[in-house]
Image (tube, rainbow, N blue to C red):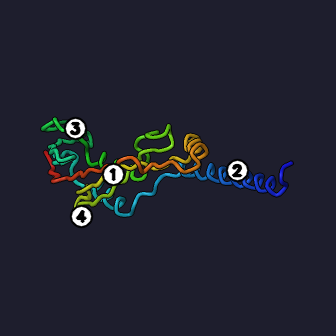
Amino acid sequence: MQNPRRTVLRRGALVLLALLLSCGGVGAVIAQTAPAAASPALLRAEARWATRSFNHYELRLRDKGCLQVIEVRDERVVDVVPNRCEPPPRSVSELFTLIKRDGQVSTECILLGCACDDVLSVKASYDQALGFPRHLEVGVSAQPNWQHPDYWRQVFAKRKLPDCSALAVGSKIVAIESVRPLP
């Protein structure tokens, strides 16, 4: 015969777990549908960049230590010298897009099925006159993906939270040396 007190405690624990999971599901839907708010510094920088007097420019950019001299016309890359760097050449608008990805998943399902995702962190400083990003620190780190069933499978199988911190954290610096208008 089962202990009635133990039965009540088990049922209470199951109800509590169901409540937590359903609240988490609502939070997941809200988190997935709500866009990240752009920082005031980013908005001001984009506004300054939008008021520039030229649409054709040369961008000297150093990414992962590799210098690229990029020609951009109407925010499209038209030429890059040298073109032997690993990262693809980017326009200023593409750098703004990268900055807006701060806090977003860069790679899904990196550990224990889909228990962990890689998440971007982007810090930027901006040119005071033209607004383009001067310096970006782009990082990636593994974060728990509690919205995926694999996360919860790990919790119940191992009786502990998945350890996403076991993966390496990476970062790189992107620096714009200059932006020069072209005719």
Q: Secondary structure at mark 1?
A: strand
Badge 4 amino acid: Gln
Dot in front, 4 or 3: 3
Residue of label 1 = 139
Residue of label 2 = 18
Residue 73, image x and y in percent? 22, 41
Residue 128, numbered circle: 4
User: Which one is earlier in the sequence, the residue at label 1 or at label 3?
Assistant: 3
User: Which one is earlier in the sequence, the residue at label 2 or at label 1?
Assistant: 2
The residues bearing labels 4 and 3 have C-alpha atoms spaced at a distance of 29 Å
Badge 2 amino acid: Ala
Residue of label 3 = 86
The quadrant of the picture occupied by the C terminus is top left
Q: Secondary structure at mark 4?
A: loop
Q: Is residue 147 left or right of residue 173?
A: right
Badge 1 amino acid: Gly
